[in-house]
Amino acid sequence: MHKKDDGSTLWRLIDTGPCFGRENMAIDEALFRCFDPATSRPVLRLYGWQPPALSLGRFQKASDDLDLTRCRADNLTVVRRITGGGAIWHADELTYSLVCSPSQIPPAASVKESFRVLTSFLLGFYRALGLQADYAVDLAPAGSKLGQRTPLRFAGQESYDIMLHGRKIGGNAQRRSREIIFQHGSIPLQNRVGQGLQYLKIRPPGIEQATTCLVDEGITATVEQLKQTLVQQFAGQLVAVLQPGGLTEQEQHVSDKLLHKKYSADCWNLEGNEP
């Protein structure tokens, strides 16, 4: 239905720019909730975080992992994602989210393999910038274990995390429901992991040395230039044609409702309970 004669798939491209943390997560969930796998066009959203914020994984307990006293003293925004994993510090990064059905992307033999398909544009993006980028699974020694839980998302390695010279850059998480794939992830412009560590009860040692960012790798392109390269790689890797636009009226309504009723509530953000 949404394919062109050349076999490419029509995607919506939504660039919301920098937003508050709660607004970002409300928009992401609205895109996920409003997507109909039978009729909706797939969506790629680009955004940023202003001011910096900390996001928790769907099943993470804030009281277990965060120094909540310090978070409150610094008036830090803590928001919960609809995807799993550990805490992520969001500052000076280019973030993306996407929503699609399995039929709208190149074939993947399994859910895990879909991570390779849906992160291929990131691998292409880093390589287009002249960086030696590889998946963690392709670099891991035989017998090594990936995917172990850590309170800080960037402290662990998943199979399809992207590595630059042995250091992890960014992170990605996925959720599936009713033939819908939702995925979001980050591209760090500056290495701000150290800022986020101060809000953890237990700070993983060596994390700043185990992660990297574009500036550390010598990339000084503007955000707009980076977005252009990212969109080009997305189109090429996923055989997509991206058409810029905004949220639909329904998506904006659902986002506003989620923002005020869910993402402004501690019962969700800190405890993971739907209000």
Image (spheres, rainbow, N blue to C red):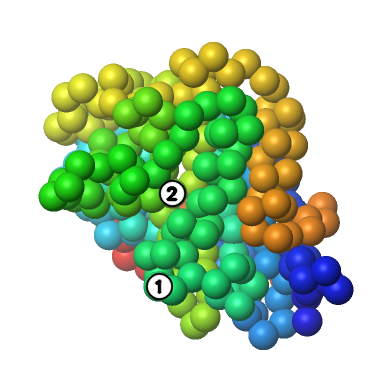
Residue ID for mark 1: 110
Name the residue nearer the viewer: 125 or 150: 125
Crowding at label 2, few (<14), some or many (≥20) Cα neighbours within 10 Å? many
Q: Identify the image quadrant of residue 115.
A: bottom left
Crowding at label 1, few (<14), some or many (≥20) Cα neighbours within 10 Å? few
Q: Identify the image quadrant of residue 130.
A: top right
Residue found at x 62% / y 16%: 220
Q: Which label is found at residue 8?
A: none
Residue found at x 78% / y 75%: 2
Name the residue nearer the viewer: 156 or 118: 118
Q: Which label sits in the foreground, 2 or 1?
A: 1
Task: For marks 2 and 1, give the CA distance.
Answer: 17 Å
Q: Position of residue 233 (x, y in %)?
A: 67, 45
Local SS, label 1 = loop
Q: Amino acid at mark 1?
A: Ser
130 sits to left or right of 56 = right
Q: Position of residue 267 (x, y in %)?
A: 33, 58
Residue most extreme to the bottom: 38
User: Is residue 254 visible in the rendered structure shown here?
Assistant: no
Residue ID for mark 2: 172
Does 95 appear above or below 76? below
Does 87 appear above or below 50? below
Q: Amino acid at mark 2?
A: Asn
Residue found at x 42% / y 39%: 134
Local SS, label 2 = strand
